[in-house]
Image: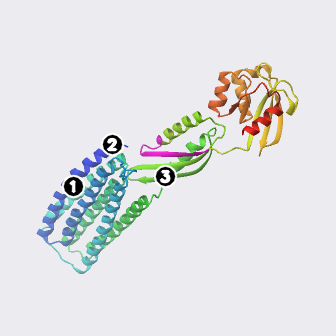
Amino acid sequence: MNKKGTLEGEKVLKFHIVMIAGVASIQMLAGLFTGMTVVIADAIRSFSSILDLFAAYIGIKISKKDANKNFEYGYHKIETFAALLVSLGILYMGYLMLVQSINAFEMQKFALGHAFVITTTVISIQYYYRLSRRLEKAAIESNSPALLASAKNKKMNLVIGLAVLLSIVANYKQVPYIEGIISTIISLGILKVGLSSTKQSLFFLLDYWDDPVLFSQIKETLSKEKDIVIEVKRLRLRRAGSFIFGEAFIEMNPFAGVEDLRAELDNLKEKIKGLNPYIKDFAIYSHIPRSDNFLVAFPVKKIAKINSEIAKSLGETKAYLFVKIVENKIKKTYMKTLKSEAKNPIKLAEFLNKEKVNIVINNELPSLVYYNLRRTHQILIYPSFSDVPTVQKMLELLLIDK
């Protein structure tokens, strides 16, 4: 997690809770002095906005607590819950503004002291502009939904401030209905933002996922490891506060060694976490199926099909007999001659990899070939035995062993 971003978010919230209280107090004095209900309502709205900042601050603070026996997954969803409270606050603010707007059509009151309320409104507009920018920056740095909801709220405060300013000017010019029209449009916009934020917060609490790009990136990362991962059966992601949790259910290569699987799974986890700094945890559940469909490569001394004698060393290997097994029955056999230049470790590995074999019968393979086949491409190197001289006998043993 970006701790620096989270600390900056807390710092911004604490400072501006105090500052908004000051701005709201000045607005209230201006409203009471002039008797303009729109200014008083704007002051009340500013006081109510302190609540969403406080909720966001509490949410971020508590969500950082370590997991314990009662909350084994941590407290991260508290921040999402705080974002929900903020969103509900936006909805309520929109409702109050809508009621105020409707009343403005009926109560055409022209006040005095416009210069004072214009000055205080301009100050509040400038302040909310700077605050929304700082909150948005802190939300991005900390990946905090609560801060992002607060930033949206403050942007609405900025727009509402402009509407209030226009209403004051209209009141000064004694133009009727302008205050009601502008306030109605703004209040509907606030309700729209509130509904959107509430929906997102509720969905996050219900483990809804809405980032198809990251989902595709993770699935692609898993699918790229074709030598290890046969199939991605299922992938799940969820959001909890600033963090992302996920799990994948994959089918593994049945011919890979346990030590290779352990290392590869660890590597896969690190690759996935590297896709997004806010992936808190990612679990990979693997299933290793029994394979009834595989290709075996037998080193042979001479071409004699299924009765060929197995070559015990690379030097006496004249060819490879490839046997395709499907449901424990021989489906196909074919032979490929091994030229002397192909016995070079690199060339031999390329020769066998090209056929996409699953099992190779060992014939004193060089370490470089063994490593390339076994550790890099997850091909099973099956031992040869002195008392199993032919392909036929080795195949019977192999099928029993499988």
Asked whether 314 falls inside the magenta stretch, the response is no
Kind of residue at badge 3: Leu
SS class, disc 3: strand
Residue 237 - label = 3
Q: Residues within 10 Å of mark 3 (few under 14, many from 20)?
A: some
Q: Residues within 10 Å of mark 2 (few under 14, many from 20)?
A: few
Q: Nearer the viewer, residue 230 or 194?
A: 230
Figure check: 15 above or below 273 = below
Residue 221 location (% of width, % of height): 55, 42
Main SS, magenta region, reads strand
Count of numbered marks: 3
Residue 244 location (% of width, % of height): 44, 49
Q: Nearer the viewer, mark 3 or mark 1?
A: 3
Question: What span is in magenta?
Answer: 273-287
Kind of residue at badge 1: Ile
Asked whether 282 falls inside the magenta stretch, the response is yes
Residue 17 - label = 1
Rounded to the nearest angstrom, the CA distance separating label 3 from label 1 is 34 Å
**Quadrant for the C terminus in the image:** top right
SS class, disc 2: helix
